[in-house]
Image: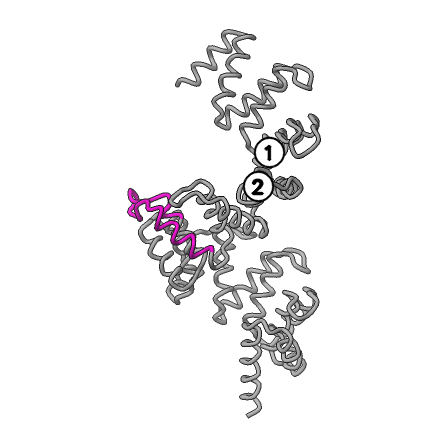
Amino acid sequence: MEKMEKDERVTRLKDLIEEQNWTEALPLAESLSAEGNDEGEVLLGLLYYDGHGVTQNAAKAKELFEKSWAQGNARAACLLGIMYEDGNQVLPDYAKALDLYEKAAGLGNRNAMFNMGCLYLYGKGVKKDAKKAFHLFQELAEKGDSDGELLLGYCCHKGKGTEPDIAKAAEWYLKAADLGNDAAMRALGYLYYYGAEQDGGPKKDIQEALKWFHKSADLGDIEAQYWLGTMYAEGEGVHRDYDKAFRYFLKAAEQGIPEGETDAGLAYLNGWGTKVDFAKALEWLRKAADQGESFAMYTLGYLYEEGEAVEQNYDLALKWYRKAAEAGNSDAARLLGDYYAEGKTVPKDEKLAAEWYQMADTLGDKEASASLAWLQLKGNRSDYMDFFRHKVQ
């Protein structure tokens, strides 16, 4: 009778957490935990871990997870594994994480099996073993686990641990999507957007891609939201709609997607779908630049060069162009070449100009190729001819 009452209280606690009713969930979790109930301990730990209804406290969460795991709770073992993998309140220890995942998986915890698969797929702290990852995802998928279906689809798509099979990948993505997996919906969107008919997959179908991106975005997938923003901004498959594009970009930006931050900044800068607001434009562009987004860096360089939205400052322009070029932006590298070739606000230095042009050329900038050829022609005709022969081969 007492066990039945405890089980009913655990079920009630899970329902309260699902409803996000933290006011009632917290005291019930505390009561169960005080009684030594392993489910109460792990659920109270989650409340502390996420800061729901209580001040966030990862150390307290770890303590509760350890108590629950001491009683054999598989979910607690998996959560401790995540803490060791992420280095949260402990030094990162992939071997310890893997050990906990293996034990939790042995007790039937699917999340632990999935996390093990990811460690092996990406070689995170362990020797990369795509075949082992594939079999773990396959086992999960056969149990109807949507994350397992998603990653099994990815393995088939990219040939990880198995032969590439786009048609099979699409099947697994669709199964996961039918279970409500937003990332699988996005993956289907990509397949239809790019088309994979020649590889046995679906043919290119922008409207079908839009359908899946919308489904994924509606469930909160930030990459799908950004992708929709791009499609609305460019009028691809839809009527161009800057208002919708801006809303999607802002959603992605607010969740830390650097490309979304860049495009939100550009929208505020140019008044695309919103009012011009230089302060917000600079705020988002700098956030994106801090995350290494090269176009945001390039844009900041341009703004400082032209004195738009900021006070003109060539030193800062050069700083941001260098950062952008080093992050792979060919336009920035070419402009730096122009700066040094022309002696624009810097001492003229054709050798340094050639280095920047060479970088831009390597990154695929055709204008830089011509500028580099001209510099080499001026300096040494045989060098120029060697360069020209290389370009036409």
Q: Nearer the viewer, residue 231 or 66?
A: 231
200 in the magenta segment: yes
The quadrant holding residue 195 is top left
Mark carried by residue 68: none
Give the farthest residue toward the bottom.
1
Q: Main secondary structure of the magenta part?
A: helix
Q: Position of residue 202 (x, y in %)?
A: 31, 48
The residue identified by callout 1 is: 299
Q: Amino acid at mark 1?
A: Thr
Q: Amino acid at mark 2?
A: Thr
Residue at horizontal 63%, vertical 29%? Answer: 322
2 or 1: tag closer to the N-terminus: 2
Question: Residue 262 bears which disc, if any?
Answer: 2
Point out the stretch of residues depicted in magenta.
190-217
Report whether residue 136 is seen: no
**Residue toward you, 131 or 385:** 385
Q: How is the image coloured?
A: one colour
Q: Are marks 2 and 1 in contact (CB under 8 Å)?
A: yes
Task: Tell me the SS state at disc 2.
Answer: helix
